[in-house]
Amino acid sequence: MVKLDHLVLTVREIDRTVSFYEGCLGMEKVVFGDNRVALNFGGGKINLHQAGKEFEPKALRPTPGSADLCFVTEEPLAEVDLRLREQGIDIIEGPVRRTGSVGPILSVYIRDPDLNLIEIANNIVER
């Protein structure tokens, strides 16, 4: 069995990305190694690579804006929606029902500063 430890996002501006994910999803900035930056959340980590200055080894074609990520939150989507709108972040779709890794989810979609597609979801408990 495997589980995801971390993933890497190649971004145009690390500080802007950190501000977005801290404010939007409550992630925590961490600095490690040789001044590398990551975002910690719920047992996972996103390492951030500055476009054009990626850490080796790297993806064959690291490109800002090429990711499509889904994050599950226990915060009700109505509250997520309100907080995002208060921050001037447009909901591009949702709430919509989707299928997550453990079953049905209810999701909203936004874009981060690099235009990655970010899905924020609640697990649906069916009775």
Image: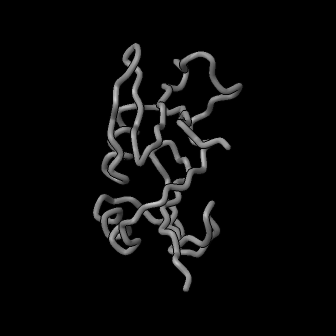
Q: Which of 9/123 is in front?
A: 123
Q: Is residue 46 left or right of residue 28?
A: right
Name the colour scheme. Answer: one colour
User: In x, y percent, where is residue 107?
Assistant: 52, 68
Identify the residue shown where x is 31% and y is 64%.
Answer: 83
The quarter of the picture where the N terminus appears is top right
Looking at the image, residue 80 lies above or below residue 9: below
Asked where in the image residue 57 lies, by quadrant, the reply is top right
Q: Residue furthest right?
A: 60
Identify the residue shown where x is 60% and y is 50%.
Answer: 68
Looking at the image, residue 23 lies above or below residue 6: below
Q: Residue furthest front?
A: 1
Q: Is residue 124 left or right of residue 75?
A: right
Figure disc tally: 0
User: In x, y percent, where is residue 27?
Assistant: 35, 45
Identify the residue shown where x is 40% and y is 13%.
Answer: 34
Q: Residue furthest bottom?
A: 127
Q: Is residue 80 left or right of residue 55?
A: left
The quarter of the picture where the C terminus appears is bottom right
Identify the residue shown where x is 71% and y is 25%.
Answer: 60
Looking at the image, residue 36 lies above or below residue 68: above
Q: Residue furthest left?
A: 86
User: In x, y percent, where is residue 10?
Assistant: 54, 32
User: In x, y percent, where is residue 121?
Assistant: 49, 65
Q: Is residue 11 left or right of residue 22?
A: right
